[in-house]
Amino acid sequence: MNAFSLRNGELFAEDVALSQIGRRFGTPCFVYSRASLEQAFRDYDQAFGQRRHLICYAMKANSNLAILNLFARMGSGFDIVSGGELARVIAAGGDPAKTVFSGVGKSRDDMRQALSAGVMCFNVESESELQRLNDTAGEMNKRAPVSVRVNPDVDAKTHPYIATGSKENKFGVAFGEALRIYRKAHALPHLKIVGIDCHIGSQLIELAPFVDAVRKVLELVDALAAEGIELKHLDLGGGLGIRYRDETPPPPAAYVRALLDCVGERHQEILIEPGRSLVGNAGLLLTRVEYLKHGEARNFAVVDAAMNDLIRPALYDGYHEVRQVVPSAAGSRRYEIVGPICETGDFLARDRELAIREGDLLAVMSAGAYGMSMSSNYNSRPRAAEVMVDGANVHLIRERERIEQLFSGEHLLS
């Protein structure tokens, strides 16, 4: 669904004008649609029908407590990559027993925290991690539930920074080594094998890489079964893309159907780990034009949001549509949309045709994923506010950071 639409020429979030949000909460500000978030989750959940499954939201995409709580109330599990994310799951009312712990660099403290909380599974990504987890669980007189993240060496056909399933990537264990590592895990006294995991990348817009990866994983599942190692679940990852510009990713129903067709009649519970596709199009970044600079080579619209608020354009050359919130009578020009940070790479959009004036509001679309979660305080800039729109109601779900908070933990030399 598209919760951001024009009404009498003005851009709304559900039933609330974005200009009203700008006046009330200031800018820059992230704005999310509750209806979009809920519909995105239902699209996945309903696609499974009666098939036993668990959707584990990959919360690195957006870890605001209100969003986590919303998904938890809909029955979501979570995919985490740090002890801090586990703490957020618990604070948001999520269930550790429906949480999988991924990530290549889990510390002993991470492991102890997760074992104490009772996470569903550790997605182990190296042989060294397997041994460390066994030792840590033994010290706590526990058995750690594990799956091995298998790297199927499949080309995800996405940006190289967000590809995770080739043999050149740091993630998972090599496909050819996986059976041996499972044998080792089976022999270790403080581990309990419960599943297998695979994830090949993010912002994927074709089904073929998913299918290729699942087929390779299922070869390993059958080999394990032949050796008496039975799995309770198959974690088939996430990574389904969204539309930023002209992409045409398959809908969740087609993605789920392709996975289920591969899995067939196998009895294991199916886990998937969508992140971006649940939240990306459900949010935008609201920003105000501070200055217009008309130069010989380029025209610049200097806005109050910057790369510290939304780093995707600078980091990935990521594209975000930019829409005017209220029509302007200004003449149309092509602009570079840039922020106030002292870096040439501080831009949100390039070469956009806009009819704008200083003081106008702009909406940077599809900013619900990897906006706030990757934000920073570079140039000592407080992070933006976040609000959730629910029909005609607006809820502040994160207060704008205050400057004094930025250095509250710092100390002068005596």
Image (spheres, helix red, strand yellow):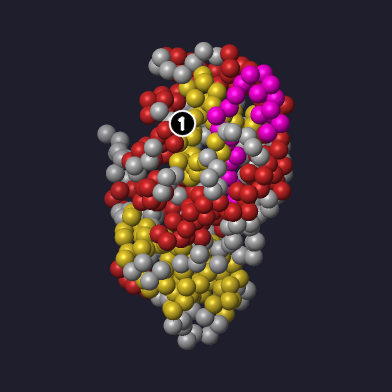
Residue type, label 1: Met
Under tag 1, what secondary structure? loop
Question: What residue appears at the point 66 percent right and 39 percent down from the top-left corner?
Answer: 264
Question: What residue appears at the point 66 percent right and 48 percent down from the top-left corner?
Answer: 258
Question: What residue appears at the point 45 percent right and 14 percent down from the top-left corner?
Answer: 138
Q: Where is residue 58 drawn, in percent x and y?
A: 50, 44
Q: Is residue 116 left or right of residue 125?
A: left
Q: Is residue 413 above or below residue 349?
A: above
Circle 1 residue: 120
Q: Is residue 207 left or right of residue 321?
A: right
Q: Is residue 117 left or right of residue 217?
A: left
Quadrant for the C terminus in the image? top left
Q: Is residue 185 above or below residue 265?
A: above
Query: Badge 1 local density, few (<14 within 10 Å), some, or many (20+)?
Result: many
Is 232 in the magenta?
yes
Question: What residue appears at the point 41 percent right and 14 percent down from the top-left corner?
Answer: 141
Q: Which residues are magenta?
A: 218-241
Q: Is residue 172 above or below residue 48?
A: above
Foreground pick, 393 / 60: 393
